Image (cartoon, rainbow, N blue to C red):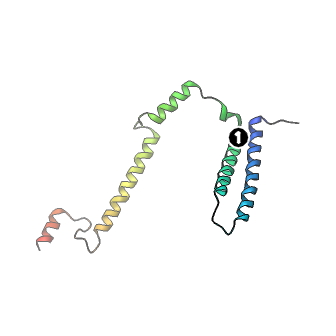
Amino acid sequence: MIFAPWHRLAGLVFVAASGGTTLIHRAVYDASRNRPPLAIEMGLCLVTMMLASMGVMLLIHGRRLFERMPASSRRSLEDRVLGPIPPAGRVYDTRRGVALMQAHASLKRARASCSSHMHPLQHGDSIERIRLRQKL
């Protein structure tokens, strides 16, 4: 008989417990179907979600969740999270790309609103043309 490590066994217990709290939650829901939701329903929902997510994490990752990171990895993680973003990094490119995409979208919206009939500006108008049109 093969014994699973205790982490994965605990994950199975958590998933089974979440199934039990789901059944309890269902019974409470059926008992109070025609009334407003009860606080115990919300509590059971929260407990079910916590048990299920902990169980699945333990099943998938097992012992790795409890291993400590080496000091060198911890420092590099802190540097990556808290340090400045280098211009050549992938995160910088992503942030810059999103910022450019938002800027282009807002400019497009502004141009679309300016090209309406009610606004004196038209797409591609220069300041001289606008002033000339206002004089006429």
Rendered location of residue 39, percent (x, y): 63, 56
Relative to 133, residue 38 above or below: above
Q: Residues within 10 Å of mark 1 (few under 14, many from 20)?
A: many
Using the image as rendered, state which of residue 38 and residue 89 is in the foreground.
38
Using the image as rendered, state which of residue 5 and residue 91 is in the foreground.
5
Relative to 95, residue 102 above or below: below
Please, which residue is most extreme toward the top here?
Answer: 71
Rendered location of residue 37, percent (x, y): 64, 62
The three-letter amino acid code for the residue at tag 1 is: Leu
Rendered location of residue 43, percent (x, y): 65, 53
Please, which residue is most extreme toward the left here?
Answer: 135
Q: Secondary structure at mark 1?
A: helix
Q: Determine whether, in the image, residue 57 is placed left or right of residue 23.
A: left
Circle count: 1
Q: Determine whether, in the image, residue 72 is placed left or right of residue 20.
A: left
Using the image as rendered, state which of residue 11 and residue 90 is in the foreground.
11
Question: Which quarter shows the C terminus?
Answer: bottom left
Using the image as rendered, state which of residue 34 and residue 69 is in the foreground.
34
Relative to 46, residue 119 above or below: below
Q: Determine whether, in the image, residue 23 is placed left or right of residue 95.
A: right
Question: Which quarter shows the N terminus?
Answer: top right
| Label 1 sits on residue | 58
Residue lying at 59% horizontally and 25% vertically, measured from the top left: 70
Residue lying at 46% horizontally and 41% vertically, measured from the top left: 90
Residue lying at 60% horizontally and 29% vertically, measured from the top left: 69
Please, which residue is most extreme toward the right here?
Answer: 1
Residue lying at 35% horizontally and 59% vertically, measured from the top left: 106
